[in-house]
Image: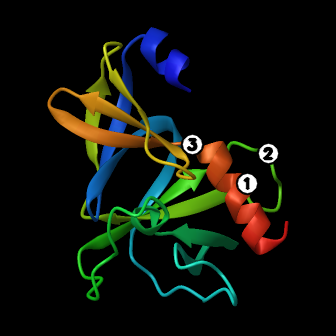
Amino acid sequence: MNESLATAATLRGVMIQIPGSQLLLPNAVIAEVLTLAESEPVEGAPDWLLGKIRWHGWQVPLIAFSRLARTGTPSGTLRGQRVLILKALGGNPRMPYMAILAQGFPRLITVPKTLEDLGAAGEDIPALKVRYLDEEAMIPDLEQMEILLQEVLGG
């Protein structure tokens, strides 16, 4: 993931606020941005898996990436929070989408090829830390997140 970002031409990205940090994702992986909907809990799931939401006939797992990365917890009030529906990259026909909880609306940016690599976000955290201009952000490893979800959801 690191090398492809460093050598790629500029691309459109989305900066997403989460508690205690922000995420940087390619614009192309975002299917839709929604207001937060009720989620159905998943029994025995880790705290970062908030449940599943219904979206266009799919049961989409909803992730609190801030809990997964241990940067903070979503506030008790979910007003102003958004859900980003992401296209899954792993090719699992049973889980073509996943969702991330965000604070407010994502910000569209142009990502330069001079993105500074700050290393892994932490042990067992599926993300890379980078610096964009004067801001630090994490780039989630979406394939690793899918693997984590499949382990939790059994498929």
Q: Secondary structure at mark 2?
A: loop
Q: Position of residue 128 (x, y in %)?
A: 46, 37
For the question of whether residue 34 can be seen, the reply is yes
Task: Provide the residue designation for mark 1.
Answer: 147
Distance, label 1 to label 2, CA atoms, is 11 Å
Task: Provide the residue designation for mark 3.
Answer: 141
Classify mark 2: residues with Cα within 10 Å, few (<14), some (14-19) or many (20+): few
Task: Provide the residue designation for mark 2.
Answer: 91
Residue located 55% across and 48% down the image: 126
Q: Are marks 2 and 3 in contact (CB under 8 Å)?
A: no
Along the polypeptide, which appears first: circle 3 or circle 1? 3
Side of 143 relative to 16 (left or right): right
Asked which quadrant contains residue 9, the reply is top left
Q: Kindly identify which numbered label has been placed on residue 133.
A: none
Classify mark 1: residues with Cα within 10 Å, few (<14), some (14-19) or many (20+): few
Along the polypeptide, which appears first: circle 2 or circle 3? 2
Q: Secondary structure at mark 1?
A: helix
Q: Position of residue 84 (x, y in %)?
A: 44, 59
Q: What scheme was used to colour the molecule?
A: rainbow
Distance, label 2 to label 3, CA atoms, is 15 Å
Q: Position of residue 10 (x, y in %)?
A: 36, 15
Classify mark 3: residues with Cα within 10 Å, few (<14), some (14-19) or many (20+): some
Residue located 77% across and 63% down the image: 150
Residue type (three-letter) at the residue carrying disc 3: Asp
Along the polypeptide, which appears first: circle 1 or circle 2? 2
Residue sitting nearer the eye, 152 or 92: 152
Residue type (three-letter) at the residue carrying disc 2: Gly
